[in-house]
Image (cartoon, grey):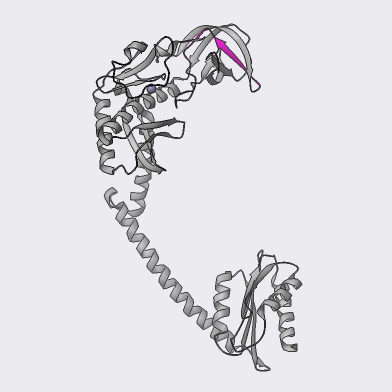
Amino acid sequence: MTRRMYYDDSYATRFSAVVVERLAVDGRPAVILDQTYFYPASGGQPADTGWINNVPVLDVFAREGDAAVVHVLANDMPEDAATCRIDWERRFDHMQHHTGQHILTQAFVQVAGANTVGFHLSPDSVTIDLDKINISAEAVEQVEELANRVVWENRPVTARLVKADETDRIRMRKMPGHLLTDGLRVIEVADFDLTACGGTHVACTGEIGIIKVLKLERRGDKTRVEFRCGGRALRDYRQKNAAVGAAVAALTCGVEEIEGAILALQEDVRGLTRSLKAAGGQLIAYEAERLLGETVETNGIRIVKRNFERREPLELKHLAMQLVEAPGVIALLGTSGEKAHLVFARSADLPHDMNALIRQAFAQLGAGRGGGQPALAQGGGVPADSTQIQAALSAVEQSILNS
Ligand SMILES: [Zn+2]
């Protein structure tokens, strides 16, 4: 079995080793070393990446069965003498978050009586799942206060092996189902937290920098807590500070006034929308009146037949409905373009079937879908230019006059 050197030293990033086995993983070359500082993905913590003889290490995992640590490489690496380097930035980010997770988990136990039942760490998100719901905002603040106090007190974080007969005497937060033969690895945040863990941790809590909870989200009977530590918390703060700065500049207000300013803006928009709708209704009424004034009555029916360039289907419908409020009116309206649209409507005192007429128009235009009621039908979707629409409307007008 590979000697896992990171158990004793999380900070070593350069080391030498010897290749003891070569294999292929999903078509890529992979090696097993006699010893390694590369962390294989497990316990919610992703694998380290880095380089072996300058060949990128893409993934590291423990092989099922013998738990040998497999290093998956980007390319072939023929030498048996391996000079290894771990991507420190990535490793340190994992150390900050993994140790931060131990502290945050213990803080949730002490403040809210909530136990951590899951941990997830990826480049985009860091979360723990708690076995409790409805945790108040005040409790979360207390958790943050406690967790960050432990960070600022810069307490030592130590790892040691505990023998099977010792486990009854120590109070641990999490006890695994079975013990490894050589004992159980426990991580202690001095006078605060003791738990079994195989991950990589910082030596002193101050290195975590800060622990910040971003949000709580209910997941069934559990709560998912998203948080950030150290460098990621700084980047998150930087990004949010820039966003707040932009909002403050756009709203010309202070930071504490942003929410009020946005609510006021939303109220303004609602008022303007109401006014615009009312004004639009009045315009449609004037337009309908004008169109009716221009229409000659034939056989007791006034047929308003009109094509518009690129008009909103909803506006077309409102105009048609306004037109047929007067008795004895049939409105045959269309808008040409990439997605032509037709709206046919008739007054309540007329017998004509708009559904049948709109199908006739679509048959002439070649395609398109639509329908509705005998008094009001609409549809479209096919490209048609002004001439084509005019021709279809004229044909419909003729069938009405001939009926
Ligand atoms: Zn850990």
Looking at the rendered image, the quarter that the C terminus falls into is bottom right
> Picture coordinates of residue 19 (x, y %)?
57, 7
Question: Observer-nearest residue: 276 or 58?
Answer: 58
Magenta-colored span: 27-37
Question: Observer-nearest residue: 126 or 295?
Answer: 126
Q: Is residue 248 above or below residue 403?
A: above
Q: Quadrant of residue 208?
A: top left
Residue 188 visible in the displayed image: yes
> Picture coordinates of residue 57 (x, y %)?
55, 19
Q: Main secondary structure of the magenta part?
A: strand
Can you name the residue that lies furthest to the bottom here? 300
Residue 335 visible in the displayed image: no
Residue 253 relative to residue 1: left or right: left
Q: Quadrant of residue 121?
A: top left
Q: Quadrant of residue 312?
A: bottom right
Q: Is residue 33 magenta?
A: yes
Numbered circles on residues, count:
0
> Picture coordinates of residue 283 (x, y %)?
49, 79
Question: Observer-nearest residue: 11 or 227?
Answer: 227
Q: Is residue 365 above or below residue 256?
A: below
In the image, what residue occupies the spot 25% across and 26% down?
150
Q: Is residue 372 magenta?
A: no
> Picture coordinates of residue 61 (x, y %)?
53, 20
In the image, what residue occupies the spot 53% across and 16% down?
51
Q: Is residue 334 above or below residue 197?
A: below
Q: Quadrant of ligand 1?
A: top left
